[in-house]
Amino acid sequence: MTNWFTEFQKFHQSFLRRGLAVLVDQEARTPRAVVLTPGDHVTAATLNELLSLTGGIPFVAIPEAQANGLMLLELPARLSHNAREATRSFVSVEAREGVSTGISAEDRARTIQILAESPPQPRKLVRPGHVFPVAVVEGGTLVRNALPEGAFDLGVLCASAHAVVFSDLLDAKGEIPSLDAMHAFCNQHQLPAITLSQLVAHRLEAEQLVYRVSDARIPTSTGGDLRAVVYRSRVYDGEHVALIKGDISGSDPVLTRVQREHTLTDVFSGTLSKSREHLHFALREIGRVGRGVVVYLRSNDFGALASGAGSALGDRAALMRGYGIGAQILRDLGVTRVRLLTGSPKRLAGLKSFGIDIVEQLELPRDLSALTNGPPE
């Protein structure tokens, strides 16, 4: 185990003693932090301290299955506080019984405990209220590297929680503090702190989200003879495939393309995006260079045919920020340093969280009309 594993155990123990912790997303364009506490048995005193420290709104992270079981009313993305992270947010709720105004720390604690109950009891809640539920994806930060998922992961890892309360850390002016101010805040209030990068590093070391199911050699018209390694995810149905050229072992950076499937475009030459051209170009490039890997990810948002609509993975938030699966496949193949083929070169926030070092970004050509599909020379 690495030194970080030991450090996480220290954080774990401190979190349990203190009852509160701070999670920092320091790699976001605007670094943010949340203060969090497990919600299953949250007390009025702990909740009151959390709200007093942060000055923010109390959100409760619960699994999507729990949110569905509670029959929560989802907010449109444009009204969602977490729309930037594509987190499902819901109309505020309140306990039907055992509360007065619903706004006191004791009343909110009661509502939070109901959100954590298993099996879910939708009849125990009314809306609107004073507690704001959000749903986190199964797989947590290994699938979506965002603060709600991170808060829930910590609650599960450190306290076996079924719900986690978190609130954005704000300064006296109601603004997001600087990183230095966040660190000073943690020291002042003796709060254990961890970053999203550190949390994901721990999960990647302790867990495995994907596993191999087959390995074969296949001929292609664009990349020549390739090795195809098929993976399944412990989170989503369906298979992902890594197409490998040459020997990708060793410390030298590997020419790499990670791309989400778009069946209508990739297979039937649809015109919804340049996905097919990007895929063929990437395969041709690794064939020309003689060493590289293309990771082709099964879409988990739509059915196989419906996934023709939408943008490639690299055109969304940041490469693999929402798809830790791709990074785990690369790590399983022994690839940790990449020369990345991407259609949208930019700061790829959070990629180091997944143990992947981008040595170089290579922009895909904008005009691929002259691309031929013949075998590499």
Image (cartoon, rainbow, N blue to C red):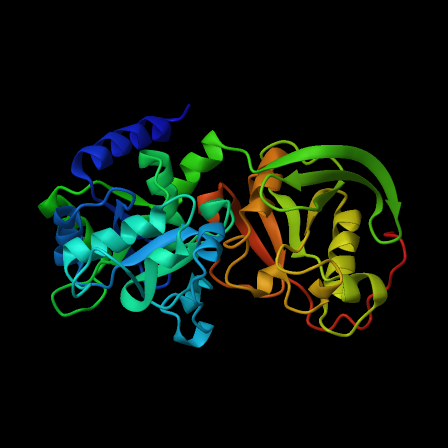
Give the camera-side residue of 161 and 349: 161
Q: Viewed as shown, does residue 98 lie left or right of 114?
A: left
Write down the quadrant of residue 102 in the picture. Answer: bottom left
Residue 256 visible in the current orientation: yes
Q: Image height check: is 61 above or below 82?
A: above
In the rendered image, residue 376, in percent from the top left (x then y), is placed at 85, 52
Give the camera-side residue of 26 and 189: 189
In the rendered image, residue 189, in percent from the top left (x then y), is placed at 11, 46
Q: Viewed as shown, does residue 148 lie left or right of 98?
A: right
Q: Viewed as shown, does residue 107 lie left or right of 235?
A: left
Quarter of the N terminus within the rendering: top left
Q: Viewed as shown, does residue 357 lie left or right of 40?
A: right
Q: Image height check: is 186 above or below 331?
A: below
Q: Which residue lies furthest to the left in this view?
A: 188
In the rendered image, residue 205, in percent from the top left (x then y), is placed at 47, 31
In the rendered image, residue 97, in percent from the top left (x then y), is placed at 25, 57
Residue drawn 33% across and 41% down?
A: 155
Residue 32 visible in the current orientation: no
Residue drawn 34% across and 52% down?
A: 115
Q: Residue furthest top?
A: 1
Residue drawn 74% across and 38% down?
A: 229
Write down the quadrant of residue 125 in the picture. Answer: bottom left
Count of numbered circles on the image: 0
